[in-house]
Image (cartoon, rainbow, N blue to C red):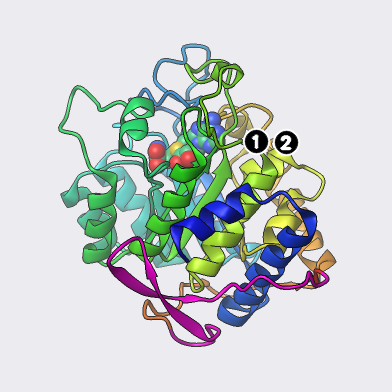
Amino acid sequence: MYRRDLLRWLTEEQDGALSELWLRANDVRRDSVGDEVHLRGLIEVSNICVRQCSYCGIRAGNAGLTRYRMTTDEVVECARAAASLGHGTVVLQGGEDPGLTPEWVLDVVARIKAELPLAVALSLGERSTPELTAWRRAGADRYLLRFETSNASLFARVHPARNDCAPRDRIAMLHELRDIGYEVGSGAMVGIPGQTLADVADDVSLFQDLDLDMIGIGPFIPHPATPLGSSLADPIEGQAPATDLMTYKVLALARICCPRANIPSTSALATLNPRDGRELGLMRGANVLMPNLTPLRYRVHYEIYPSKACIRETAQQCHACMQHRIRSIGRHIGRGAGSATQRSFGAGVPAPGRLPFAGSQHRHVPALKPGPPRRERSS
Ligand code: SAM
């Protein structure tokens, strides 16, 4: 899709036109990844972080937060719960915590892989090449690292470099993860203070350029104990709104531009719209949900933003709720690991148009033609 078309959709306000976007995204989702919704059990292994990201509640500078790091046994126990609930994947996510040593992570990954039929995804921030390589060799299947925003100067502002080690370029790291053999996930926040709609259009283009296996998109939610906690009061011109509607648009465009990717309907979306945010995400391009398996005594402290969805439900309650939501829209839970389909555009992708995009580059994208609004179907 041309950048100007992405921008046009991002600024579109008419319900009728937006219905067409939702329908198209849902059609592409059904034709490319099917009606299954894959469950990835989220285990928030540590909220200790050395970074000072100005958007994130677990940043090192938030002295008001009770810090924790789970033990290996606790993580493996959560993974057992995931397997017994029928999840195909666990995601081990945490702050950039030096206490999560290379050996600790390697041991956890090896134990889960030896004992349970689960894919393991890691989301542990910017780590060194030897660490990433060792964890892949131990059996880790996927790595998730959001680029957060494609606007490099904004990213540098909101994600200051560590002063104790050389900066890592997240985009270069995503390529490196692919070379090491991981399935690669990235993503962005929508509505970071200082992020324009043009930046968001570029985010979608970057998803496509990186040919990602997984794409996580969530609204920015201000946390009062962070530097960006109150700056929404003074928006810049062209500021992208941090709303659920804008997030659905980005999600739908990501699906249309990246048909084969696994795309979650995120907790941040459910936090903005607890009633049916998850379902609307699933009906507008998403095919993954991430039930939270973190023990309750820790979960309340993984406060990247306030009022996070599913903060007080047990793993079983969270699973039952998600199962109900999936069935209510006529979809079903996927079996197995739910790996991304092959990287070349292939199986089931609807008739691609070969369109010039972003100047000289060319890539296949399904054409999205304006037309009379159709009615939104559930799957
Ligand atoms: N440390 C790892 C990293 O940076 O990739 C993983 C943990 S980090 C807390 C996970 C994600 O939380 C980030 O990629 C970011 O997009 C999201 N996040 C953090 N603060 C947020 C906020 N205030 N609103 C919405 N999402 C937020």
Q: Amino acid at mark 2?
A: Arg
**Residue 143 figure quarter:** bottom left
The answer to whether residue 302 is magenta is no
Rendered view: 48 above or below 103:
above
Residue 296, numbered label: 1
Q: Amino acid at mark 1?
A: Leu
Q: Real-space Cα distance between discs 1 and 2?
A: 6 Å
Front-most of 95 and 235?
235
**Residue 86 figure quarter:** bottom right
What x and y, as percent, mark residue 234? 56, 17
Q: Residue at x 54, y 32 (%)?
A: 239
Front-most of 225 and 260?
260
Q: Is mark 2 within 8 Å of ligand 1?
A: no
Q: Which residues are magenta?
A: 346-375
| Residue marked by disc 2 | 312
Left or right relative to 128: residue 201: right
Residue 226, numbered label: none
Whether residue 70 is visible: no
Q: Residue at x 81, y 61 (%)?
A: 324
Front-most of 13 and 70?
13
What x and y, as percent, mark residue 87? 60, 64
Whether residue 77 is visible: yes
Q: Residue at x 80, y 68 (%)?
A: 376
Secondary structure of the residue carrying numbered label 2: loop
Rendered view: 93 above or below 66:
below
Secondary structure of the residue carrying numbered label 1: helix
Mark 1 vs 2: CB contact within 8 A = yes
